[in-house]
Amino acid sequence: MASALFGIATGALNAARSGLQTTSHNISNANTAGYSRQGIVQSTNASLFTGAGFMGQGVNVSTVQRQYSGFLESQVQTSQTRLSRFETWHGQMAQIDDLLADPTAGLTPAMNDFFAGVQTLSQHPADTAARQSLVSSASALAARFQSLDNRFSRMLQDSNGRIGASVDAINGYTSQIAELNDRIRLASSNDLQPPNDLLDERDRLIRGLNGEIEASAVPQSDGSVNIFFGNGQPGVVGSKAFTLAATRDPANPETTTVGLQTAGGVVQFRAADVGGGNLAGLMAFRDVSLNQATNALGRIALGLAQTFNDQHAAGMDLTGALGGAFFNAAQPQVLSYSSNTGGATMAASIASLSALTDSDYRVAFDGTNYRITRMSDNSVQTFATLPQTLDGVTFSIAGAPAAGDSFLVQPTRNGAREFGVLISDLNRIAAASPVRSASARANIGSGVIGAPTVSLPPDSNLTQTVTLTFNAGGTFDVTGTGTGNPTGVAFTAGGAISYNGWTVRIDGTPQPGDSFTISLNSGGSGDNGNALQLGKVQTLKSLMGGSATLGDGYATLVSGVGNKTRELAAGAASQLMLVDNAVAARESLSGVNLDEEAANLLRYQQAYQAAGRVIQIADEMFSTILSIGA
Amino acid sequence: MRISTALMYQTGSTAISRQQSELSRTQQQISTGRRMLAPSDDPVAASEALRVEQGRALTSQYLSAQGAARDRLSILEVRLGDAGDMYQSLRQLTVQAGNAALSNADRASLAREVRGLQNQLLAIANSSDGQGGYLFSGFNVDTQPFDRTPAGITYNGDQGQRLLEVAAGRQIAVTANGAQVFDRVRDGNGVFATRAGAVNTGTAVVSAGSVTDASLITRHDYQINFSVVAGVTTYDVLDLTAGTTLSTGNAYAAGDAIAFDGLSFKVDGAPANGDSLSVRPSQNSSVFDMVDALARALETPVITSADKAELQNSLGQAMTHLDRAIDTALDVRTGVGAALRELDGLGDMASADALQADARLGELRDLDLAEAISRLSLQSTALEAAQQAYLRTTGLTLFNFLN
C-alpha cells in the first residue's frame, strides 16, 4: 500500500516538475520571435481494479503541446506579405516624392529661368550678354534634367541590387525550410510527439519568407510543408529547395528579372508569380512607378527640345542662316531581346509629340503579324506590316525577323538623359525672323504691310524675294521663286497672303502700281521676331493630345508621384492594421503572458510540494509499521 | 482576450514611436515653414503650386518686357520730341525767309542756319538706342540709318519694327524706323502736290491746295498750261495719266482757285505765256531732301520777279512739307504716348496678378504657424500620455509580488 503511494507521488512529482520546466521554458522564450507557448497535457494513469472498485494510480504527462493555430499563423503570413509589398513600394516611391519635393530644386524654376532668358533675348536680340545668359540658363536646365534622370537611374540600379538581395534572402529561407522539413520528419517519427520548437522555427522562417515573396505553405502528412510562391511556382517540396536566380532581363539589359533555376535554364517569373512581399514591391516600383516617372520626365525634355528646335529652325541667326538645332532631342530607345534569332533591326521615331504616352512598347513578331503591346495597360494592336504609327511613335523594321522575335521600344526613355544644349556659338541663336516685309518708297496708296509670320517647318523657298504688285481693280500680281508667279490675285484689306511658308497682311488701300516685297531679313540683328515665337513655346500646349504645356506635364508628373505615394502610404497603413490584428490574434493564442506563467509557477510549485508531502506521509506510514516491531 | 507580454511591450512602443514621428513631422513643418514637405502631402496643391509658379514667372516676364518697352518708348518719345523741335525751328526760319524785305545775303545766312538744323536733325535720326545700336534703322540696328551721299541723305535701314509681348497675347511696337519717321513723309498736302514749272518765266505762285471731294480723286498726273494771248490769260487742264484734256481756254484771274476732279488750289500772280503748273499725287519724300530744297531756294539769289515767284513757290512747298513732317512725327509720338499709357495699365494688371499669385502660392505652400504650434503642443501632450501609459502597464507584473 505504501509502495503504491510512493509510485503515485513520484508520478505527481514528475508531472509537477515537467510543468515547472515547461513554464520556465515559456518564461525564457517570452521574447523569442515566433515562439508558441507550450503546456503539458496531463492524464490519469490506468486505475487498478480492487474489490473496492477502481483505485486511481496517479498522473502522467502525455505530451508537451504548443498553443498554435495554423489558420492564425497563415493570416499573419498573408497579411505580412501584402504589407511588405506596400511598405517596400512606398519606401522606394518616397524617394521620388522627396526628390520632387523641394520647390527650388525641381524642374519648374530652371524652366522658368530659361524662358526668362528667352524673354531677355527678345528685349535685346542683338546683345551678346542676353545671348550668353540664354545659353547659360539653357545649360542649367539641361543639368537639371540630367540630374533628375541620373537620380532615377540610380534608383533603378538600387532596385536591381535590392531585387538580387531579396532573391538571396529567399534562397536562404527556402534552403533552411527544406532542412527543417527533414529534421521535423525525423523527429516526429519518434512516438508521434511533435517537435514544437522546430515547428516554431519553421513557421518563423515561412513568415520571413513571406516578407520577401508571397509563399503559401501546404502541410504534408509526414510533418513537412511544401512551399509555393505566388500563383503556384514551387519553392520547397519536402526536403528539396528550389533556387531562384536574379538574371539580366533578356528584353532589357538595364533591369534584373527573377526566375526559377532549373536544369534547363532559368524560367522567368511574371509579376503574378511573385505576388507579394519585398520582391513584388521592388518590381512594381521599378517596372511601373519608376519607369513611368522616367518616361514622363523624358517626354517633357523631348517636348521642350522638339518644340523649341522646330521654332528655332524657323528663325535666322546673326550669321544670316536659318537656326540650327538648339537642344539635343533624344531618339526612342530600341532594344532587341537577347533571345531573338532573326536578323531584323527595329527602329522607332517620334511622329507626333502630342500623342506620346509615358509607356514603353513591346513589338513581338509571331511569324506573320506584329503585335505591339502598350505595356502600361497591356493593350495590344496587331499589324501585318511595318512601319506603323501608334501613339505618336512610328515603328519600322529592317531585315527579316524570326517568329518569336521581340523588341522593346522606349520612346521617351532617353529624353531627359540626352537633353543637352547644342548651341555654343552665340551668333547661332536665331532670334530674328528670316524674312521681312517692305513697301516700295514710290507707293502712293495707303497700304501698310505687317511683319511676315513664318509657318513651321520653314519652306525651302522661305527667303526668296517675293514682290506683290497691285493692279487696277484691286488685284495683285506675285513674282518670286516658289510662288508660281500668279497674277490677278484678289486682295482683301487685312486678309492673309501666304506664299513660300510665310504669311503677311496688308491693311489700307494700295493704289495700282504700288508694290510690297518680302525678302531675306539681311542684317536684321535687331529683329526679335523669332525670339517672341520661341517664348511662346512655354505656353504652347504640346503634350498629352494638345491639352498640356511642358509645365503642365511636370505638374502632372509631380501630382502623379504624390498621389501614388499617398495611396501606397494609405495602403501600407491599412495593411499594417491587418497585420497588427493578425499578430494580436496569434499572440492571443500563442504568446507568452508572464503573469500567467507566474501563476503556473505557483501552481506547479504547490503541486510539487503536495506530492512531496504525500511521500513524507508514505514514509511516516512506513515508519509506523516498522516501529510496531521495535 | 489573452494578451501576451511581448505584444503589450510592442504595442506600447509602437504607439510612442508613432506619436514621435507625428511630432517630428510637425517640428519639421515649423522649422521649414512649409505646409507640404513632399508632393504626397497634398498632390493636388503641389501640382497647382507648380502651375501658379509658372503663371507667376510669366507675369514676371511680362513685367520685365513692360519695363524694357517703357525704356525704349521713352527714348523714342524724347527723340521724336527733339525732331519736332527741329521742324518748328525750320518752320520759323521759313516764315522769316518769306519776308520781302530780306536781301540775298540775309537769305544766304538763313540758309546756313537751315543747313545747321539739317545737321542736327541728321544727328537725331542717327541717334543711338542706348544699347549699342541705332534707334531709327529698323532691324538693321548695326547700320547707320542715314548717310550723306552725293545724291543727298539716304536711308539705309529697313522697315522693321520691333515688337515685345507685354501681356498674354498683346504685342506692342517699341521701335519706329527711319523710313516711317524721316524718309517717307508725303509731300504736298498729303494727297496731291502742286508745282510751278521749272522754266516758268511769269510770277505765278501756286498754293498747296486741298481736296474738295475725296470720291473724285483720281491720283492722276495733271498739267495746267497757261497761254497769254493779247493780254488775256487762259489755261488748259490736261490729265497726263489718261492722256486727255479736261478743259481748255479757262479764263484766269490772279487769286483764282483752279478746281477739277475733286481737288482745288489757288494760283496767284501773273503767269507768262507757256508757263505751266503740274499736279501729281503726293509722294514719299525725305525730310532731309526737303530741307535741302529749302536751303537751296534760300541760297539762290533773287533778281527777277520770276525768281521771286520761284522763291515763294519753294517756300510754300517747304512749309506744307514741314507741316506734313510735323504731323508724321506727331502721329508716331501719339502712338508712343498711347503705348506708354497702355503699359501703365498693363503694369498695374500684371502687378496685381503677381500679388495674387504670390498670395495663392503662400496659401498652397506655407504653413499656418498658429495652427501648427497648437498642433505641436497637442502632439507633445499625447506623446507624454503614451509614455506614461507605457510605464504604468509594463510596471504591472505578478512577479513583483512573488518572493
Image (cartoon, rainbow, N blue to C red):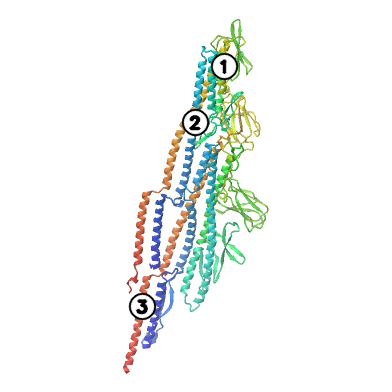
Q: Which mark is residue A122?
A: none
Answer whether labels 3 and 1 touch (C-beta < 8 Å): no
The residue that mark 2 highlights is B75
Q: Does A37 sit above or below residue A470?
A: below
Residue B299, which numbered label? 1
Q: Which of marks 2 and 3 is in front?
A: 2
Of labels 2 and 1, earlier in sequence is 2
> Would residue A618 be found to the left or right of residue A145 on screen?
left
User: Of tags 3 and 1, which is closer to the observer?
Assistant: 1
Name the residue furthest bottom: A629
Q: In this view, does A50 lie above or below A339?
A: below
Confirm whether circles 2 and 3 share one chain: no
Say which of B259 and B13 sits in front. B13
Q: How far apart are marks 3 and 1 (CA)?
A: 143 Å
Q: What element carries label 2?
A: helix
Dot 1 falls on which chain? B
Front residue of this view, candidates A587 and B189: B189
User: What quarter of the picture does the N terminus of chain A occupy?
Assistant: bottom left
Question: Quick one: which residue is furthest to the top in this view?
Answer: B230
| Dot 2: chain letter | B
- Mark 3 is surrounded, within 10 Å at the Cα level, by few (under 14), some (14 to 19) or many (20 or more) other residues, namely some
Q: Mark 3 points at which residue?
A: A605
Q: Which amino acid does label 1 sit on?
A: Glu
Name which residue type carries label 3.
Answer: Gln
Q: Is residue B345 above or below residue A158?
A: above
